[in-house]
Structure formats: structure tokens, C-alpha cells
Amino acid sequence: MIIETVDYHTGGEPFRIVTGGGPDIPGASVLDRRANAARPEFDAVRRLLCHEPRGHDDMYGCFLVPPDSPGAHLGVLFWHKDGYSTACGHGTIALGVHAVQEGLVEAAADGETDVVVDVPSGRVTARVRCSGGRVTGVVFRNVVSSVLARGVPAAGAEADLAYGGAVYASVPAAAFGLSVTPGDLPELIALGRRIKAELAGHPATAHPEEPRLSGVYGVIFHEELGPGHQRNVTVFADGEVDRSPCGSGTAARLALLHEDGFEGPLTHESIVGSVFTGRVAEVVDGGIVPEIEGMAYRTGRHTFELDPDDPIGTGFSLR
């Protein structure tokens, strides 16, 4: 097994794009392919790239797949150490940068270019801004995002549930006497796992139209830093930590804040100090259309191998 990748980070969160040797995953749509990707013969590649010793327990990446229709440039399956997610804002920003830098989508040296991507939760757009032939920023336009429920009891606190391409539970860190800082991160991870477990199967976590998009994907712990300025950390999947402000999580936060009367823009800061800027682009039936601005940077190109005699095989996870 020989796999080639191009790696990026968006706000400190890794994103590994498979560019060669990846699996040919069948399916009539990207959402169908997400289900089929869990088959052992395909999932071995995710494990190889995500697990130690080639990755780590907070690794993130994707397989490029055909889009659902010619209206999109790319299709994508997002993955992490525990499987496949339905959305990824930081990954969509990285894909926009990748598509322009690698010439997958033709872009002018100065101006904006839309990179349209089909993801499991629907069609999204990365609007890539260039100046002097260099990418200087990306605005990620997400699927319709909405509030699902308010004040749902979990872990001795109350969680607000919202959808931003995936379902997120939002809880103030102060509800547990904590703050969004690296020193409190171990406790926040434990609480994120506990809240997700307690909300498993809760009716409020159901997507109104597509059952395959249901269930809490991440828990967002947030705190106010000033008017229109929040810091957050998202604990997603099974105890994984988003180093970025979380793109689809920012969309979910915007849905909640908009319902509270907030007009934005939102400066959304991560636990490592990186920033996304979010705003409500449109108010539509069923919710809002959020736009989140950020930037991704290429960190390397890699060729990964699996020696058939290697007893560790596709790797391991310690978490």
C-alpha cells in the first residue's frame, strides 16, 4: 500500500488530502459513499493515515471522490480517527486553497474564485481570494444551519443543540467552572465525551430530514471575550479536539446566536488563538446560510507506505 497526500492546517487543525493511491469507494452520492467507506478494504487506508505511527489521535483528512453532479468541482469524504464525518468547515477551507494552488480549479491571479464541493451534508462553496497569484483567504459558505433544541439537560448542565452540517451541543464552559484554556482541556475532553454519551439517541439530536445526519457529532464549550467575540473548543467524535475554531461548529453557533438576536459578525477564536470570522449571509426557510472566513496553509507532501511484514499494520490509537 503506497498512499500520497498533501497536508494543510487551517487555524492549527490538520487536514490530510489523499492525492494518490486512495480507495475507489462506490456509491450513487457522496452521502452513500460515506456509508460504504466503512468497509474494511476501504477503511484500512483511513486507519493507515490517521492512526499512529503515521498520524495521531487528533488527525483529520479526506478522500476526494466524484461530486454528485457536474455543478460541483469536487466531492469529498471527511475522516478522523473514529470514522467519517458529515461536514468539515476547516477541511472545506483547506480544499479551496488546495484546488487553486494545485490547479484543480482555474483561478485568476487577482480576485475571487468559487470552489464548489459536494460533502455528505450537501453542497458547500469555498470562495478563494487571490492577490498577486497568492491565496490570501477563503470564505466558506455552508449548508443551511438551524437550531434544533434549547436547554437539553446533559452532565448537570443545559446544552443548546444546533445543526451546521453536523449536530453540535453548545455549553458554556463556565457552567462547569472551567474556561477554554489548555489547562482545562483534559476536563473539557472528559465532559465532551460524557455529554455526547448522555445525548445519544435523544430526539432533539435528530436531523429533520435525513437520519444519516443525526446524532451529536461535537460538543462546543464556549466563553464570551467581548461583544461579538467568543472563544470555543470543540470536542468531537470520541474525545478528539479541534485546534481551529471549527468551521461547521461556527455555523451551528451562528444559528444559535442569530435566534438570540445577534447580528454579527462573530469573531470566533480557538483554544490555540486562531480565528474564524462568521456571519449570517442569508436568512432562509428552516434557518440561516452562514459564511465563515479563514485560511489554510500547506505543511507538506507525503508518500506513506505499508510494509506487508510490519506487525503494527495500519496502526493504533491510544485514546
Image (spheres, rainbow, N blue to C red):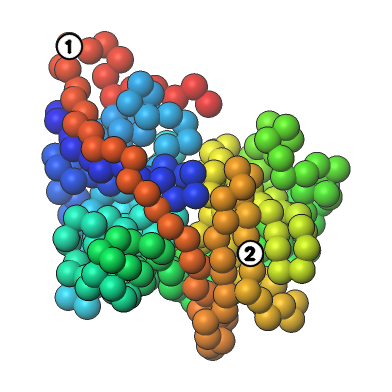
Estimate the x, y position of residue 104 in percent, counting from the top left. 17, 61
Q: Which of 42 and 179 is in front in this view?
A: 179
Horizontal arrangement in the rendering, residue 300 relative to residue 167 (left or right): left
Estimate the x, y position of residue 169 in percent, counting from the top left. 65, 57
Q: Name the residue under label 1.
A: 309
Q: Which residue is drawn at 49% across and 73% down?
A: 291
Estimate the x, y position of residue 296 in percent, counting from the top left. 40, 53
Q: Which of marks 2 and 1 is in front?
A: 2
Q: Which residue is drawn at 22% across and 78% down?
A: 71
Kind of residue indicated by mark 1 = Asp
Q: Mark 2 points at which residue?
A: 267
What is the C-alpha distance between the residues marked 2 and 1?
Answer: 50 Å
Horizontal arrangement in the rendering, residue 188 relative to residue 135 (left or right): right
Quadrant in the picture for residue 105: bottom left
- Please determine whether, in this image, residue 74 is positioned above or below residue 62: below
Q: Which of 111 and 97 is in front in this view?
A: 111
Q: Residue at x 18, y 25 (%)?
A: 305
Estimate the x, y position of residue 196 in percent, counting from the top left. 63, 47
